[in-house]
Image (cartoon, rainbow, N blue to C red):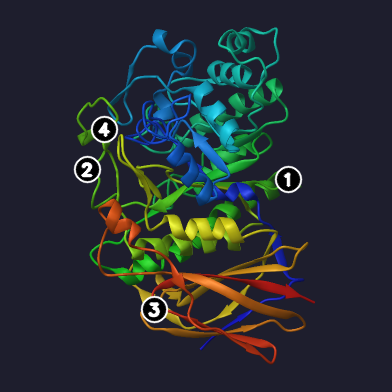
Amino acid sequence: MTIITLHPDFRIGPVDRRVFGSFVEHLGRCVYTGVYEPGHATADEHGFRGDVAALTKELGVTLVRYPGGNFVSNYVWEDGVGPVEDRKPFLDLAWRTVEPNVVGTDEFLQYCEREGLEPMMAVNLGTRGVAEAVALLEYCNGEAGTKWADMRIANGREEPYGVKLWCLGNEMDGPWQIGHKDAHEYGKLAAEAGKAMKLTDPSIELVACGSSSMQMDTFGSWERTVLSYTYDIVDHISMHAYYEELDGDRASFLGSGTAMERFVERVVASADAIGAEKRSDKRITISFDEWNVWYLTSRFPGESNLPIQRDAPRIIEDRYSGLDAVVVGDLIVTLLRHTDRIAIGCLAQLVNVIAPIMTDPDGAAWRQTTFHPFAAAARLATGEALQVKVDTDTIATAKHGVVPAITAAATIDPDTGALALFVTNRSDQEQTVTLRHPGATARIDGGTAVLADHEGARETQEHAEAYTPVDALPVEQGNGTITLRLAPESWTAFHGAMEL
């Protein structure tokens, strides 16, 4: 039997709403025929699809990172502003696609404004440098009377956009990145770009590139070196992680949240070591600005094997199963267990490309299985994250070693007492959980569960929409404890209340 213990006075910290972010990159059909499709039956006057916007709101997305991703390291942002008829297409080397430059900085930022989304912009530190990064910042945030701000005004936007979050490049540790650099080269460049950007607008927050994954040969040393140059300038360091089921190894796949947790703890340790060395009271937080289930090994041929294509080709359009949805829910549990250090999260990506939302050109938009756990967590996880003690059995996995059979995260809204509890059952058996809340009263009012399956990917709209969350198994309450029943290989979001 598993015992989960929590109390409203034992808290990790506030849940930053930016942890429920997503990612729009000029990759495949994420932009064109994804968020943007003039002429679509639901398109607004600006060409953005209303059905996708409605699903994005239902998903609970708060923040969107743009324009990349690998795309940004070869991007000339100036070519994507001004009259659309004057913009010239260019060859994106990251995804070997001819980019038409129809959607650019202004279109994206105005879309965010209309939809109530916070933008997170990335600057190109692959093929470009300090001057170009500062120019983009001035274009977005500058007041009238300077070159780039006046260009924005001439392009029809009088008021500054006030973009607060900025990524200093993308995955610069990766040999696949255009303009790849070693840690010293990148650290020096990021420090200079960040310094100049904060002189331009001191109100912004900066994200330094961390490791592209924990499997990188340079992991650990990369963080230490980069932060040794940038610690006093940046606010966050990025983390990227993708997980997939390989060779039918369900146990390891279901244990992916443990691997993510180890990744977080090691990055935090690296950042704090530099802080200690500098005798700094500042604490670097994490921007986990790419995470998801991605069948990178088994379904993607690699960028270098892609032919040069036009017209928003179908690239990396993974279709997801119920098992994938359970793992996505478990990764969210990990994010919520570290709200004291994770300030930002971006599910990569929003539409069509390894995404919770899929579209047909000139057709429908629909939810993938992975839509459901994200939407439930974004809706219920408010206020502050609680410290959750989980006493449970363990499961041996081939890839991650021994992992807990049950994982959990919880949040409480201090104003209303609303309690949310998110629990993953990684085992293939139904599990009984005793929820203890000593010194406090608590109740569970209901819950929904995402269940794994053995059917594989949900390939069509009709197939995907046939998969929906189910009501949680019966809950028994009384005598200071609550008994929860968890379906095999499931992720469950419970809601209720707690007070002293």
Q: Earlier in the sequence, mark 4 or mark 3?
A: 4
Q: Secondary structure at mark 2?
A: loop
Query: Which is in the foreground here, disc 4 or disc 2?
Result: 4
What residue sits 56% from the left and 26% below the top?
Answer: 110
Q: Earlier in the sequence, mark 1 or mark 3?
A: 1
Query: Which is in the foreground here, disc 1 or disc 3?
Result: 3
Query: Which is in the foreground here, disc 4 or disc 1?
Result: 4
What residue is shown with label 2?
301
What residue is shown with label 4?
313
Q: Earlier in the sequence, mark 1 or mark 2?
A: 1
Give the Cα separation between the discs numbered 2 and 3: 33 Å
Query: Where is residue 245 shown, x and y percent of the image?
Result: 30, 61
Query: Which is in the foreground here, disc 1 or disc 2?
Result: 2
Q: Horizontally, is 63 left or right of 204 in the view? A: left
What residue is shown with label 1?
282
- What amino acid is at disc 1? Lys
What residue is shown with label 3?
488
Do labels 1 and 2 touch, CB within 8 Å? no
Do labels 2 and 3 touch, CB within 8 Å? no
